[in-house]
């Protein structure tokens, strides 16, 4: 008879501070593993959003932003995303947090699934252009609505900017 493996992995010894050893039992069981595998598979199955998909989403869900995109800007992803940034700035100025929230939700969904080109455009021409160095109450409130990945990217940008400023001194 072949023994069946237990649902937990064996205990492992690893060094801690000051050379001491402590037992560590892995808490990953098969149910957790399959759940994690399913989540990863779902994320990988989500289609990437490209520039043309961005324009479609903006046109469908934010027609007021689509109206801002001029013919000379069309096809240049940073300028198209910049039109969204201008609309968000206008919503801040009007204290129209319903519009800000709607734009933030769309951008968060796009940001999570964007291809490299669109990701960079959203990061630079919307997220950084809109939030870096801003301390107004509206910006702070809107920053609290950012998704975790967007907040993390913004923090990294702030750290990079701070390093550049201190290196320039």
Image (cartoon, rainbow, N blue to C red):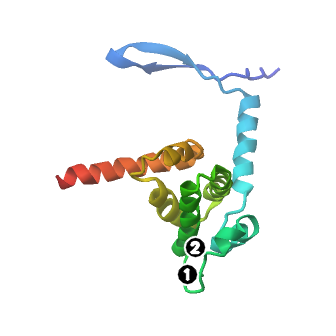
- The kind of secondary structure element at disc 1 is loop
125 or 4: nearer the viewer = 125
- Which residue of the protein is positioned furthest toward the front in this rendering? 94
- Residue to which mark 2 is pinned: 80
95 or 69: nearer the viewer = 95
116 or 123: nearer the viewer = 123
Image vertical order of residue 8 relative to residue 162, above or below: above
- The kind of secondary structure element at disc 2 is helix
Tell whether label 1 touches label 2 (CB within 8 Å).
yes
Residue shown at the point (60%, 86%) measured from the top left: 71
Dot 2, how many residues are within 10 Å of its Cα: few (below 14), some (14-19), or many (20+)?
many
Residue shown at the point (42%, 51%) measured from the top left: 134
Q: Position of residue 1 (x, y in %)?
A: 83, 20
Is residue 161 in view from this perspective?
A: yes
Image vertical order of residue 139 relative to residue 3, above or below: below
Q: Is residue 164 left or right of residue 29?
A: left
Q: Position of residue 129 (x, y in %)?
A: 45, 61
Q: Position of residue 16 (x, y in %)?
A: 40, 19
- Which residue of the protein is positioned furthest toward the bottom in this rendering? 72
Q: Between disc 2 and disc 1, whose residue precedes? A: 1
Image vertical order of residue 100 relative to residue 11, above or below: below
- Residue to which mark 1 is pinned: 73
């Amino acid at each position: 008879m072949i023994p069946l493996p237990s649902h937990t992995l064996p205990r492992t010894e690893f060094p801690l501070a000051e050379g001491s050893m402590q037992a560590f039992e892995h808490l990953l069981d098969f149910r957790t593993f399959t759940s994690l595998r399913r989540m990863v598979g779902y994320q990988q199955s989500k289609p990437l959003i490209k520039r043309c998909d961005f324009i479609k989403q903006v046109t469908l869900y934010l027609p007021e932003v689509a109206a801002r995109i001029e013919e000379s800007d069309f096809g240049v992803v940073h300028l198209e995303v910049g039109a969204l940034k201008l609309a968000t700035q206008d919503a801040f100025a009007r204290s129209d947090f319903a519009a800000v929230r709607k734009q933030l939700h769309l951008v968060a969904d796009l940001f999570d699934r964007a291809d490299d080109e669109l990701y960079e455009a959203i990061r630079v021409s919307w997220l950084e252009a809109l939030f870096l160095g801003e301390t107004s109450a509206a910006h702070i409130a809107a920053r609290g609505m950012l998704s975790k990945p967007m907040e993390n990217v913004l923090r990294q940008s702030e750290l990079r900017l701070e390093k550049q400023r201190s290196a320039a001194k």
